[in-house]
Image (tube, coloured by chain):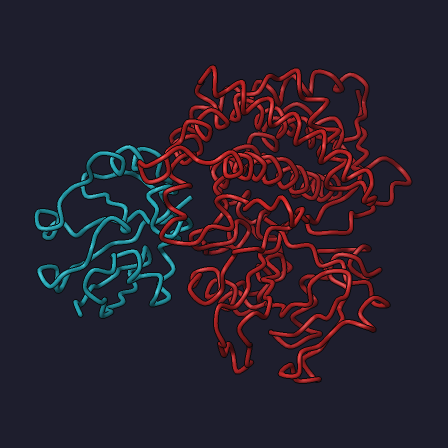
Amino acid sequence: MSTPTPASLDATANAEIPAHVPPDLVHAVGITESAEFLAAPHRFMAELHDKYPPIFFSPSVTNKSAWQLTKYDDAFFVLRHPEFFTSAGSGPFPRDPDDYFNIIPLEIEPPHHRKYRAIVDPLVSPKAIMAMEGAIRGLANELIDQFIDKGECEFARDFGRPLPVGVFLDIMGLPRDMMDEFVRWAMGLLHAQDRQIAQQVMGEVTAYLQTVIAEKKANPDGGAVSAIVHGRPGGGELMSAKEIFGFVFFLFIAGLDTVFATLNNIFVWLAKNPDRRREIMAEPDNMANAVEELLRVFTVTFSGRTLTQDYELRGVEMKKGDRVTSILPACNYDPDIFPNPREIDFHRPRKPTLAFAGGVHSCMGAHLARLEIRICIEEFLRRIPEFELKAGTKIEYWPGGVVGPKTVPLSWKA
Amino acid sequence: MTTVTYVEHDGTRHAVDVPDDDSVMQGAVNNGIEGIAAECGGGLACATCHCYVDEAWIGRVGTAEGAEDDMLEAVAAERRPNSRLSCQIPVSAALDGLIIYLPEAQY
């Protein structure tokens, strides 16, 4: 999950910079909200390698000041060493200190982490996800049916949003008729840009999830909410009400916005690059590689950690308690790992990317996300091979911790 | 320390010393060998540390069982009788000289 770093340049003026941070490593680069970021966020990410040192300190008063990592190797190192860089307390959502809950399993570290993750792993294992292919393809086509004859759609609203929400509801064991409500909640919680709306939506979501938790307690089924409610970490006791809520809530925030943003990014690019669409369609056997490459260049999230002890990384002295953000979208443009990083090459030699982070907290939905993205591209291009951005469209991006456009208006010959 | 040789899909060989009780997956990841992705970090949850155990060694290493056997049904590269998830192979002195072949793709 992401750690938003909305540090407006003005807001950094009064930010506290710890004494051990060398002044030449302090850079208020405006990740996720500067004009340069909002104009072209992934170009901005690629250019971080040219403009700033590989590790720099970004001050902020609106959010937590943090070290920023842009090197692939550094990010993998941090993500693979939770003993030095812990995810405890790193969740991207403000919580009431009087009614605090852990976001599970993200904020639980080894060895306990595995006991929690094991409860939902069977639902998102490669095998379980493969079994969902038909249902996802069916939903994709239902959505396309609704707009194909109109010759236009607002992709984000009509496809990018409802597809992952529908799949998410299936996995959670929630009814599809909750789709509109979930779409509204996701928008309100993640993109309202208004604290009051976010808080009100948070209240609605909490009330709904508590009702669902009670219902699944009484009537177990094969969905994720039921698995969590009846799960026994490590074969021991049932989880507390707070743990259950933190777990269900985490799946809610993790499952709704990331595939949405990724699809929207990809379809802006597809709309602008007809020759590359044809290349994808001409090479159906290379689809897995194409999806990996698109995930590399359109990575949407960040990973936040906190140091458990003093640690020196790439010659930079960090202190216990410092925060560290791996800028995953930038790490995937590391020229030392991906030569000509801005070139989108579907035949690039295979290397793991950081699109789903790494280490024990790597995205549990990675296989699902890959399948959803592959199916969406395949089905959309099969049914609507020629399309473009609506004339006069200027793509605007959301500020905040999930990188993607606000709307994606597409048109084609009906 | 036990020496394990990893052979990448393109034939490149890496002989590395792996501490006993580390897994074959950890030996690859900690030595920068890229053919193993190991997204879930050894949790038997992702099937991205797929490897082929050298035929001469498979008897000593053993074949996949249970949950690992299920996971192997979903690996990206071809599954073979000597397919294993490398996170499930603990290294020990008995495996000194082990040869592991890496598949073309992990997802």
> Which chain is drawn using cyan?
B
The answer to which image quadrant residue A375 occupies is top right
In the image, residue A218 sits, relative to residue A346, either above or below, namely above
Question: Where A304 falls versus B60 (above or below)?
Answer: below
Q: Is residue A118 above or below residue A177?
A: below
For this rendering, which residue is in front, B89 or A191? A191
State which quarter of the image contains the C terminus of chain A. top right
State the count of labels: 0
- Which residue occupies the extreme front position in the image? A98
Is any part of residue A332 visible from this angle? yes
Q: Residue at x 57, y 66 (%)?
A: A334
Residue at x 69% of width, y 51% of height: A401
Q: Colour of chain A?
A: red
Q: Position of residue A107 (x, y in %)?
A: 51, 51
Determine if residue A284 is in view.
no
Q: Residue at x 30, y 39 (%)?
A: B78
Which residue is at the front of the view, A72 or A388?
A: A72
Q: Residue B28 is drawn in which quadrant?
A: bottom left
Looking at the image, residue A317 sits to the left or right of residue B20; the answer is: right
Q: Is residue A126 left or right of residue B62?
A: right
Instruction: Tell me residue A187's x, y (percent).
Output: 75, 35
Above or below residue A44? Residue B68 is above
- Estimate the x, y position of residue A18 in percent, counting from the top left: 67, 78
